[in-house]
Image (cartoon, rainbow, N blue to C red):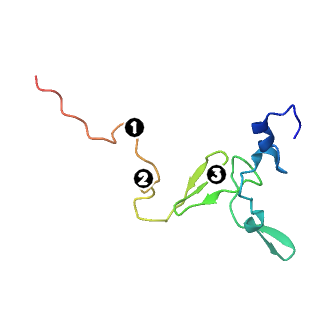
Amino acid sequence: MSPDVPRSRAKLLTGPLGGCRVRGREVQVWKYYRVEGGALVRLRRECPRCGPGVFMAQHADRLHCGRCGHTIWLEGRGSGQGAAGRGPDGTRGSARGSRPQRPPPPA
């Protein structure tokens, strides 16, 4: 450790990836690919916003990117209501008309 680097910063720069590595957890990239006929096949979907190399997490009702937060809701999973209170079309309802109107105050 060099004397001009603060101690807390020196801990972040010790790994091969710099400060990007999380302690105690290694990225297991080999689980995301399979070799078929000499070609690599990706087993998970890549994020459409982030581009190649960023895979989306597979949940029961959605695909989620941990880098940018993009979520793709899956069709035909779970109950007929969709996910997390959504209607069959995948939306939560419109801003107007989704709640019943209050009656006007008495005069």
- Distance between the alpha carbons at the discs numbered 3 and 2: 20 Å
- Distance between the alpha carbons at the discs numbered 2 and 1: 14 Å
Q: How many labels does the image show?
A: 3
In which quarter of the view is residue 25 placed?
Answer: bottom right
Q: Dot 1: within a 10 Å radius of its alpha carbon, few (fewer than 14), some, or many (20 or more) residues?
A: few
Residue drawn at point x = 69 percent, y = 52 percent: 47
Task: Give the numbered dot on residue 86.
Answer: 2
Instruction: State whether residue 105 is above or below residue 21.
Output: above
Q: Say what secondary structure mark 3 lies in.
A: loop
Residue 41: x %, y % from top left:
78, 68
Q: Is residue 63 left or right of 77 when viewed as pictured?
A: right
Q: Do tag 3 and tag 1 residues touch (Cβ < 8 Å)?
A: no
Task: Name the residue type under label 1.
Answer: Ala
Instruction: Report which residue position mark 1 lands on.
Output: 95
Residue drawn at point x = 18 percent, y = 33 percent: 103
Task: Give the numbered dot on residue 37.
Answer: none
Q: Do tag 2 and tag 1 residues touch (Cβ < 8 Å)?
A: no
Instruction: Report which residue position mark 3 lands on.
Output: 65
